[in-house]
Image (cartoon, rainbow, N blue to C red):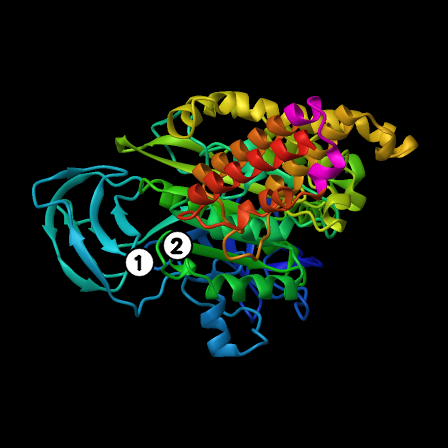
Amino acid sequence: MSGAIVMISGPTIKAGGLSDCFMGEVVRLGASQLVGEVIRLERGIATIQVYENTTGLKVGEEVSQTGKLFSVELGPGLLGRIYDGIQRPLGELAEKWGDLIERGAEADGLSKKTLWRFTPVVKPGDKIEYGFTLGTVQESKNILHKIMTPQGVTGEVSHVEEGEFPVDHTVVTLTDGAKLDMRQSWNIRNPRPRAKRLSLTVPALTGQRVIDTLFPIAEGGVAIIPGGFGSGKTMLEQTIAKFALADVVVYIGCGERGNEMADTLEELASLKDPRTGRPLMERTALIANTSNMPVAAREASIYTGVTIAEYYRDMGYNVVVLADSTSRWAEALREISSRLEEIPGEEGYPPYLASRLGAFYERAGRVSIAGREEETGSITIIGAVSPPGGDFSEPVTQSSLRMASTFWGLDSELAYQRHFPAINWHSSYSLTYRSLLKWYEDNVSQDWDETVKKTGQILQREEELYEIVQVIGADALEEKERTSLLAAQLIREGFLRQSAVHPTDSHCSIKRQEKILTLILDYIAAVERAVEQGAQVDDIIESPVTERILRIKEISEEHIEAEIRDVTAVYTASLAELIES
């Protein structure tokens, strides 16, 4: 069936003659066959949001129906590729069109040319249903891709093939004649089913000390990173993409600047996975939708990314989704809403902003997998928010806060001081800390809770002294209070500050974090005892051992224990000398 365009308003089109179309149906518009999606039906008129530039379209041009919902192709070959918001592989499009991709350009989400070695798990006579594993494909050295039964398919296996095939080759045939290949299609706005949700009891380690120690996020949790311009949101998300202890990473560049996105893609493509030594792209899928791309595709991009994440979750993997940024996504939502002439909510955003954000963040979680309940997988979502002027009271930040279990508030002042990550330790929090505590005590240290509490108390004491220092200066304080300021400085500079480019300091394992923090706290306790016995804080600040402790974070994993023993012996002797003198 087909209809005709009756109105054009930017990426929003109205078409008549589509009497039997349905909500969410994909349509093609004009001679260029632009991709669109039906988002409203009213008295015989279909409102369509177009995922490409509509310049040149004319009223009266044909609109053809496809009879399909907006879906993505899932199968081997998703990792290591760069897609736009509607799952068109940008690499293949660039090969065909060059730097300027023509409107209506098409390319398969999964390559039909690549051959994959399919190893069957089922055999003739086996009964299958949704979620059952049909076979496996070695997608990369460390990712075993499970070919799973698509939704709505049940029956008995009559024939299985083994060998190297493209993704569209039939590998399993059922007794009723149904043929299954290595692909499946999924509507991006419909969450993939799961058997049940599980408790969040394991941290999703990032290698960043301020996060893993003070404000941890659970596997299957949700974190938001709000911050003003230049506070380091993109840098932090890129660092997490490199070092997060996850099996698969899905990075969604949603509405960011084109040159910044290009730098991110180039850097990720050149990096090695610190755990395996293999290229990082082997476990990464990238969705790139820059600020100059159509806003409708930007709105779809986060759903495309999280659908790919759910697919790998259903294989039993732990997936991290990085969305940068949800504010740009919300701006696209606002623009589409205004063109639909909907009643605006706060600051012009549509009234359903919070529910749309909730629908996205609710797809995070640690789950028992449908069809294979003995297996588990997780999706951890980390969303950057770019509030105008760094105002955390604006609607996108506040709506995100209602869904987030972890809040990493970035501070522009810390960023200007070259303190990375610029996470404000006074305003940030983790609601899942208590549920993760047992894991830390079992896997890191029995004294973990006490160590974290001491660290928080030292930083809080510095905050209390800050206003006094602003008035009378640090030199006018008593020795005990100056000791408190020194302690906070050691925590801030020796532990919380972390270089994103240093070969050793850029990533810190949780065991190494515990050793560094314990050393600093032990040194602080020794300094406090020394000051009580007459040592001068100025002498301690100027002592070479203090600088050595601040540099302990740059010592590699294999040498850190020996360095800690040596530093402990040195500071013990040094403080004893200061007491005597």
Secondary structure of the residue carrying numbered label 1 = loop
Task: Name the spot of residue 529 as percent of width and height, x first.
Answer: 64, 23
The boundaries of the magenta stretch are 528-541
The stretch drawn in magenta includes residue 504: no
**Nearer to us in this view, 550 or 170:** 550
The stretch drawn in magenta includes residue 534: yes
Task: Name the spot of residue 148 as percent of width and height, x first.
Answer: 26, 45
Task: Name the spot of residue 518 as percent of width and height, x first.
Answer: 52, 31
Q: Is residue 37 visible?
A: no
Secondary structure of the residue carrying numbered label 2 = helix
For residue 140, which numbered disc appears in the image?
1
Question: Magenta region's main secondary structure?
Answer: helix
Q: Is residue 382 visible?
A: yes
Q: Amino acid at mark 1?
A: Ser
Give the total number of marks visible in the rendering. 2
Q: Residues within 10 Å of mark 1 (few under 14, many from 20)?
A: some
The residue furthest front is 581
**Nearer to us in this view, 459 or 528:** 528
Quadrant assignment, res 264: bottom right
Sequence-first tag of 2 and 1: 1
Quadrant assignment, res 581: top right
The residue depicted at 26 percent of the width and 48 percent of the height is 146
The residue depicted at 39 percent of the width and 62 percent of the height is 279
Distance Cα–Cα, label 2 vs label 1: 8 Å
Q: Which residue is mark 2?
A: 283
Task: Name the spot of residue 230 as percent of width and height, x first.
Answer: 73, 52
Q: Amino acid at mark 2?
A: Arg
